[in-house]
Image (spheres, rainbow, N blue to C red):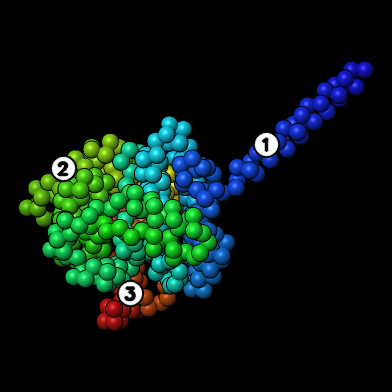
């Protein structure tokens, strides 16, 4: 009797759940129907995932994977896996954020706020599309830098903050993509073609009277793209951003010049900072002044100028009211400046401030975090705290190797940092092992005649010579001379 009544209750509950599930399925099925959206009365906060058709979908993933693997490089498979995982997570977060932005504003009738947030998110979508279009050729440089580039995509959470900015224009998006893919020369050529004069300091100043980027126009363009059929091709997303963005163009030009060590880079960064301040674009101003500070150089007589740019960057960040990524990156750059000035204790303090901010933004195993740990390793090495330095380099190496495998060139760079630390310890046997390991990684990754083998060849030869093995060092010196003769 007890069993029978219990079983009856169980099946009664199951039956109710089945009916409830069927009802919910029907409701959800109706809600998944995408209306001709963004009309105020009929707008439905569902279906954001359709925006990724042609941007990050099955066909594009297959095309990019084939391009990566076609390079034949030993790190290509792991690079592709990291890109895929990162963009899968980014696109999912975009969908959730877009739906939340729509629902929050719709519930309060704040259509202007919704338009602003969605314009910002549409800009992020266009930025992904621009990056993937520039990644499509799949050469070795692009495949090497792709994992770092996708992690550099801007925060989606920032689109929910008041004053969120819409997308930069398509020219800036393309130039940014080339920059983060390690192709600054190509980015400068693209920017020069699109900007006529090449947008030097004078060109940037002349754009002050141009109309600023309009969130409404960007939002409307992206909306039209989705409503008219987002499956029409990946190139359509970037093409919808048709506004002029003088601040973005000035800043990206400064960053491109800095990446190739152009002599005008600091002046361009200063011009970009002033233009951003005049436009009340504090995020771009913070990036510009941080870049200007980094580019000042190390001579003591220039310290006051570096401090001036640092103060301008800090003021921009204060107006923003808290940006973990920008604050963390500024602190790392300040640490580097202090280290060059032998202010090692202050440098370590700056990185200690940077690490929790970068971890909140990128996660404990993000590449920006690994970079900061390596910077702290260099400070500890300069302080003679070699065991700490080696531990920090090993932690950074674990991040890179875990994400990209043992044959990525960044693994070699970190091993060379460890080798230098071992030399300082007078542990030449370990320095030799690490240097030879780094050289082997670069030979597998890039080929035996690549210019980037120079540092590893020089390190191996120097260690062997310090060990009194000059004859064994000769072949490495000869290879180094050949590479330098034919860069």
Q: Which residue is mark 3?
A: 451
Question: Mark 2 vs mark 1: which is more N-terminal?
Answer: 1
| Drawn side of residue 4 relative to residue 96, left or right | right
Looking at the rendered image, the disc whose residue lies closer to the viewer, 3 or 2, is 2
Looking at the rendered image, the disc whose residue lies closer to the viewer, 2 or 1, is 1
Q: Give the image location of residue 162, x and y in percent.
A: 33, 38
Q: Which residue is mark 2?
A: 311
In the rendered image, which quarter is residue 484 located in? Answer: bottom left
Q: Residues within 10 Å of mark 3 (few under 14, many from 20)?
A: some
Residue at 76% x, 33% y: name it: 19
Mark 1, secondary structure of its residue: helix
* Cα distance between the residues tagged 3 and 1: 61 Å
Residue at 26% x, 39% y: name it: 320
Q: Residues within 10 Å of mark 2 (few under 14, many from 20)?
A: some
**Closer-to-camera residue (60/346):** 60
Mark 3, secondary structure of its residue: helix
Q: Which residue is mark 1?
A: 24
Residue 330's place in the image compared with 240, above or below, is: above
Question: Mark 3 vs mark 1: which is more N-terminal?
Answer: 1
Q: Are marks 3 and 1 in contact (CB under 8 Å)?
A: no
Residue at 18% x, 59% y: name it: 207
Q: Residues within 10 Å of mark 1 (few under 14, many from 20)?
A: few
């Amino acid at each position: 009797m007890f069993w029978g009544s219990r079983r009856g209750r169980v099946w009664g509950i199951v039956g109710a759940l089945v009916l409830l599930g069927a009802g919910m399925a029907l409701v959800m099925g109706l809600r998944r129907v995408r209306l001709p959206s963004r009309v105020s009365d009929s707008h439905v906060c569902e279906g954001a995932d359709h925006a990724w058709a042609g941007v990050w979908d099955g066909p594009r993933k297959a095309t990019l994977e084939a391009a990566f693997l076609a390079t034949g490089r030993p790190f290509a498979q792991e690079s592709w896996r990291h890109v895929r995982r990162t963009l899968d997570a980014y696109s999912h977060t975009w969908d959730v954020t877009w739906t939340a932005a729509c629902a929050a504003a719709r519930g309060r009738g704040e259509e202007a706020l919704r338009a602003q947030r969605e314009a910002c998110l549409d800009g992020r979508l266009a930025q992904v599309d621009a990056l993937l279009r520039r990644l499509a050729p799949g050469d070795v440089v692009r495949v090497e830098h792709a994992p770092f580039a996708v992690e550099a995509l801007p925060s989606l959470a920032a689109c929910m903050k008041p004053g969120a900015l819409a997308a930069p224009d398509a020219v800036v998006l393309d130039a940014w993509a080339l920059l983060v893919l390690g192709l600054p020369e190509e980015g400068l050529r693209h920017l020069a073609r699109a900007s006529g004069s090449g947008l030097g300091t004078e060109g940037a100043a002349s754009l002050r009277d141009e109309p600023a980027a309009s969130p409404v126009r960007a939002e409307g363009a992206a909306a039209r793209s989705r409503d008219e059929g987002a499956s029409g091709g990946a190139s359509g997303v970037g093409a919808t951003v048709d506004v002029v963005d003088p601040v973005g163009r000035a800043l990206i030009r400064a960053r491109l010049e800095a990446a190739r060590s152009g002599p005008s880079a600091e002046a361009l960064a200063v011009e970009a900072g002033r233009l951003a301040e005049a436009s009340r674009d504090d995020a771009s101003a913070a990036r510009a002044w941080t870049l200007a500070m980094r580019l000042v150089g190390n001579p003591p007589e220039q310290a006051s100028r570096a401090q001036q740019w640092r103060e301008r960057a800090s003021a921009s960040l204060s107006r923003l009211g808290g940006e973990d990524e920008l604050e963390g990156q500024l602190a790392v750059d300040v640490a580097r400046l202090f280290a060059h000035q032998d202010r090692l204790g202050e440098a370590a303090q700056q990185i200690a401030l940077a690490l929790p901010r970068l971890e909140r933004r990128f996660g404990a195993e993000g590449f920006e975090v690994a970079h900061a740990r390596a910077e702290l390793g260099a400070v500890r090495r300069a302080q003679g705290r070699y065991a700490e330095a080696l531990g920090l380099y090993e932690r950074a190496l674990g991040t890179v190797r875990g994400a990209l495998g043992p044959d990525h060139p960044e693994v070699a760079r970190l091993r060379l940092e460890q080798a230098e630390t071992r030399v300082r310890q007078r542990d030449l046997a370990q320095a030799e092992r690490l240097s030879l390991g780094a050289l082997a990684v670069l030979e597998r990754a890039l080929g035996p005649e690549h210019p980037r083998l120079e540092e590893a060849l020089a390190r191996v030869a120097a260690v062997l010579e310090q060990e009194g093995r000059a004859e064994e060092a000769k072949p490495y010196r000869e290879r180094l001379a050949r590479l330098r003769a034919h860069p």
